[in-house]
Image (cartoon, rainbow, N blue to C red):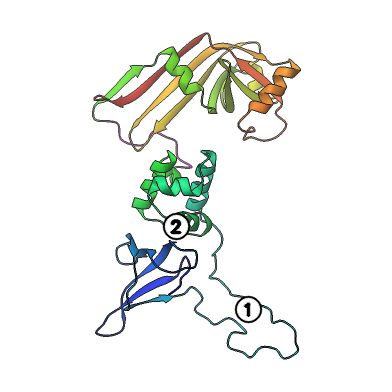
Amino acid sequence: MRAHLGDQLVIESPATGGARRDGEIVGLHHEDGTPPYDVRWSDTDDVTLVFPGPDAHIRHLEHEQPPGVGEAPPTTGEAAAPPTVTRPAGTGNPGDIGRRVAVERRRRGLSREETAGRARMSPYYLAYLEEQPADPTLATLIRLADALGTSVAALRGGGIDLPPGQGHALLHPQLRDLSREECRTLLSTHGVGRVAVATSEGRPAVVPVNYEFVDDAIVFRTAPDSVTAAAAETEVAFEVDHVDDALSQGWSVLAVGPARVVTDPEAVRELAQRAHTAPWAGGAREMWVSIEPTNLTGRRITPADQ
């Protein structure tokens, strides 16, 4: 018995010979496709390790015989071209969940084997999720989210167009101030923050930017004619936060201080080399602005018993 990912394992009824139970093979433990298999059962959506017995058979994805199979080989002496197998429509293109899993895994520098081990699943099943349109169970998503340090909602992309904080408040929340050192630690992870500036018209504006935290300074790239360029040579506020909707908790850090344009060529080169990402907004954004916080405060919401 040999199978491929996506094939169907069918358990026959000994009385009627018909299908008693079936499921999709979502994990292989041997490269040659021999048992055992990780099977997601169609009746329960659970994934279990299965050693097929004599009452089981494989229903392959290719239900139609490909052209050339069963025909006599050509007599011209030329080698016959291998038959082309047509996979079901959509096969071979990762789904949205698979893409998000792969992006998070690479972002954290994890191999498939490491991620699969953390999520307690077969590396073959993880490869299947990343490479094929798949609909993993909630239990699978929970394990993957935990392994990748993210949330099920993030992997599903359900909240991609929604502002954070729409969950219910904690029954007994605790709001506490963060120390300067805690604020520095939270800032030290690069990401997206918001710069509050006064525009040339004298109006306030808040703009999200990709930032780095280098030598106790917040730095970001912008264009000379942008709104954020107005931050140069003024005192500005910079805010970064994280909200966990699933747990109804989060934190925020506010930095206030003077902003200046980085003009030293060596400093600019070093910042460009150390940057984790290019500005998401794209375009020519080579003007580096540095904010040196003179006031750094933060708060965190947690359950009262933590």
Q: Is residue 267 above or below residue 169?
A: above
Mark 2 neighbour density, 10 Å: few (under 14) some (14–19) many (20 or more): many
**Left or right, 72 with reference to 224:** left
Does 74 appear above or below 109? Answer: below
Q: Is 167 on the left or on the right of 34, as rendered?
A: left
Alpha carbon separation for disc pair 2 and 1: 27 Å
Figure check: 226 above or below 257? below
Residue 30 in percent (x, y) is at 46, 63
Q: Residue 241 falls in which quadrant of the image?
A: top left
The answer to whether residue 31 is left or right of residue 25 is right
Say if the magenta span includes residue 176: no
**Quadrant of the drawing holding the N terminus:** bottom left
Q: Residue at x 49, y 9 (%)?
A: 295
Mark 1 neighbour density, 10 Å: few (under 14) some (14–19) many (20 or more): few
Q: Residue at x 48, y 47 (%)?
A: 101
**Which residue has dot 2 on it?**
125
Q: Which residues are magenta?
A: 160-170
Q: Amino acid at mark 2?
A: Tyr
Q: Mark 1 or mark 2, which is nearer the start of the sequence?
A: 1
Q: Position of residue 281 (x, y in %)?
A: 64, 34
Q: Is residue 130 placed above or below 234 in the rendered structure?
A: below
In depth, the one of 274 and 258 nearer the eye is: 274
Q: Residue at x 40, y 68 (%)?
A: 35
Q: Residue beneath label 1, please?
A: 83
Query: In terms of depth relative to the viewer, which is nearer, 140 or 219?
Result: 140
What residue appears at the point 42 percent right and 38 percent down from the top-left corner? 149
Asked whether residue 164 is in view, the answer is yes
265 lies left or right of 84: right
Q: Quadrant of the C terminus?
A: top left
Residue 284 picture location, percent across and down: 73, 31
